[in-house]
Image: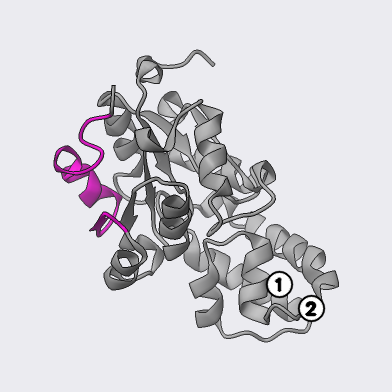
Amino acid sequence: MTPHPAARARGVALFDVDGTLVDTNHLHTLTWWMALRQHGHTVPMARIHRAVGMGADKLLDAVLGADHRAAQDGAITDAHGTLYATWFDSLTPFDGAAELLRATAARGWRVVLASSASEEEVAAARARLDADDVIDAATSGADVTATKPAPDLVRAALDKVGAAPEDAVLVGDTVWDVEAAGRAGVPCVGLLTGGTTRRELEDAGAVAVHEDALTLLRHLDTGPLARPPR
C-alpha cells in the first residue's frame, strides 16, 4: 500500500482498538467467561472485565492467579478465540471512530493501531472500522512476547513506522494502555468506552480523558493530538 501524505510526518498517533475504537470489551468479557467455564473455571465477569486489555497470558494470570495450571492456557485461549470469532460480523465501531482516525491523519499524524489481540481479531476490527486508507501500520499479539501493561507492544508499534517515543501519543481505554504507554515514555489519552473510570485512568497517568472517540474528535484541536512534532 502506498503511504498517505501524513506518513512523511514524524508524529505518530497510536490507537488501541478493543474498547477504544470498536465496542468489544464486554464481548471479550463474555467469551473469556465462556472459555473459562469450558475448562472448569467459574470466574466472576467483573474480574474478567477488569483484566480485558491485557494480553491473554497476563489476563489468565490475573483472573486465575499466577499459580494456576498454565498447561491449560493454550486451550482456554483457543476457546476464547473461537467463541469471539462468532461475533466478527457484529463488531461495531464507536461513533466517530473512523472519523477520528481520518481527522488525526489529516492533521499530519501517522496512524498506527497498537493492539495485542490476535491477527484475526485485529483484521476483523479493521474491516468493521473501514479506515485502512489512513492506517499506516498495525500490531497484534504476535509482535511481542510480553503484552500490556508491559511496554513492549507500544515499542513494537513505534518500530513499525520507525518512530521515537517523544514523537508519539497513545489513545486507549484501560489502565493497561496507560501503564504500557508510560513505561514506553509515551503520553496516553484515555477514553471511557472500555468501562474503566475517569479516576482510574487519571490515577494511572493519562494526560487527558474523554468520554469516547466522538468527544475526542470534537476536542482534537485542543489536546495532545492537535499538532504532531515536525
Q: Are marks 2 and 1 in contact (CB under 8 Å)?
A: yes
Query: Toward which corner of the image does residue 70 lie, by quadrant?
Result: bottom right
| Residue 210 visible at all | yes
The image quadrant of residue 68 is bottom right
| Cα–Cα span, label 2 and label 1 | 7 Å
**Which residue is depicted at the point 56% across and 75% down?**
48
Image coordinates of residue 57 in percent, x first then y, are 69, 63
Q: Residues within 10 Å of mark 2 (few under 14, many from 20)?
A: few
Q: Quadrant of the N terminus?
A: top right
Is residue 66 in the magenta section?
Answer: no
Judge the density around disc 1: few (<14), some (14-19), many (≥20) Cα neighbours within 10 Å.
many
Q: What residue is drawn where x is 21% and y is 51%?
A: 215
Q: Nearer the viewer, residue 70 or 214?
A: 70
Asked whether, in this view, residue 169 is left or right of residue 135, the answer is: left
Residue under the point 40% across and 57% down: 178
> Where residue 35 is drawn, which disc sits there?
1
> Which kind of residue does numbered mark 1 sit on?
Ala
Residue 65's x, y, as percent?
67, 81
Judge whether 197 appears above or below 216 on screen: below
Q: Is residue 130 visible?
A: no
Position of the C terminus by quadrant: top left
Question: Residue at image x 36%, y 65%?
Answer: 204
**Disc 2 marks which residue?**
39
- The part of the image, by quadrant, that contains residue 61 is bottom right
From this viewpoint, which residue is outermost toward the left? 222
Q: Residues in magenta? A: 206-228
Q: Using the image, determine if residue 173 lies above or below residue 97.
A: below
Looking at the image, which is closer to me, 45 or 150?
Answer: 150
Q: Amino acid under label 2?
A: His
**In screen coordinates, is 75 left or right of 182?**
right
